[in-house]
Each structure stands twice: as structure tokens, then as C-alpha cells.
Image (spheres, helix red, strand yellow):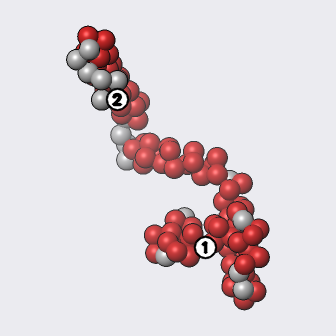
């Protein structure tokens, strides 16, 4: 979470840090004192990247855990969310079908 806080509070520093992590060329261009300041945080970038799958999973399921802790019915919430997604997909499918029919009739150009 510290990385996210830094990104929000100082986006330029965050960009410099991750650029230094990803690019040897960038690290070589930094003054020695600046590189020494970034060193521990560059190491943190490595740890974050190693744990990225775990972090992503936690972020994805955190809202569900909150619902569960609040005594809400998580299964009902997921079922309702699936129904909303299915309804949106049906709506988009109908819109796409209309678009294709009109395009085939020559009413719409392919670029529209």
C-alpha cells in the first residue's frame, strides 16, 4: 500500500522509482546520491512485482470479504452481479446485431 500512497502523493517520484527499477540505463543516468536514496525502494519494487499475483487477488476479493464480514450474503451479491453482466451483454448483443444489419443494408459505413 505504501507504493500506492507514494503514487498518489508524488507521481513524479513514483515514475522515477519504477523507471529506475525497470531500466538499467535509467539507473546509470541517476546521480550516485539519488540512486542511494532509491536503492531500498527499488528493492521494494522487486518484492511488489514478485507478489503481484497475490496482491491482485487480494484487491479483487477485498470487496467480497468486506461484505462477508458485514454479514451480507456474498452469494446473492455475486448472483446479482452476474445477472447485471448478462443483461448488459444481451443489450450489447442486440445493439451489435442492429449495427450489423444496418451496415449490411448499406445504411452505415463500416467506419461508423
Residue density around tag 2, few if under 14, some if 14–19, many if 20 or more, within 10 Å? few
Is 19 or 89 nearer to us in this picture?
19
Is 14 or 2 nearer to us in this picture?
14
- Residue 8 percent coordinates (x, y): 46, 70
Please report the residue visible at 40 percent of the width from the left and 35 percent of the height from the top.
74
Mark 2 element type = loop
Q: Is residue 52 visible?
A: yes
73 is higher (above) or lower (below) than 101: below
Could you say which quadrant of the image residue 46 lies in?
bottom right
16 is higher (above) or lower (below) than 34: above
Using residue 86 as the reference point, say whether residue 61 is left or right of it.
Answer: right
The quadrant of the picture occupied by the N terminus is: bottom right
- The residue wearing badge 1 is 16
Tell which residue pokes out farthest to the left in this image: 107
Nearest-to-viewer mark from 1 and 2: 2
Alpha carbon separation for disc pair 1 and 2: 40 Å
- Residue 4 percent coordinates (x, y): 52, 65
Residue 1 badge: none
Mark 1 element type = helix
Residue 111 badge: 2
Could you say which quadrant of the image residue 108 lies in?
top left
Please report the residue visible at 40 percent of the width from the left and 31 percent of the height from the top.
78
107 is higher (above) or lower (below) than 69: above
Pick whichever of labels 1 and 2 is earlier in the sequence: 1
Q: Is residue 90 visible?
A: no
- Residue 94 percent coordinates (x, y): 28, 17
21 is higher (above) or lower (below) than 57: below
Amino acid at each position: 500500500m505504501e507504493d500506492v500512497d507514494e503514487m498518489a502523493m508524488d507521481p513524479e517520484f513514483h515514475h522515477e522509482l519504477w523507471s529506475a527499477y525497470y531500466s538499467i540505463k535509467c539507473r546509470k543516468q541517476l546521480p550516485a546520491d539519488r540512486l542511494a536514496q532509491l536503492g531500498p525502494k527499488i528493492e521494494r519494487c522487486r518484492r511488489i512485482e514478485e507478489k503481484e499475483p497475490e496482491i491482485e487477488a487480494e484487491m479483487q476479493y477485498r470487496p467480497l470479504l468486506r461484505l462477508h464480514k458485514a454479514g451480507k450474503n456474498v452469494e446473492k451479491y455475486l448472483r446479482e452481479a452476474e445477472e447485471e453482466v448478462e443483461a448488459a451483454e444481451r443489450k450489447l448483443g442486440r445493439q451489435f446485431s442492429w449495427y450489423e444489419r444496418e451496415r449490411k443494408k448499406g445504411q452505415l459505413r463500416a467506419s461508423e
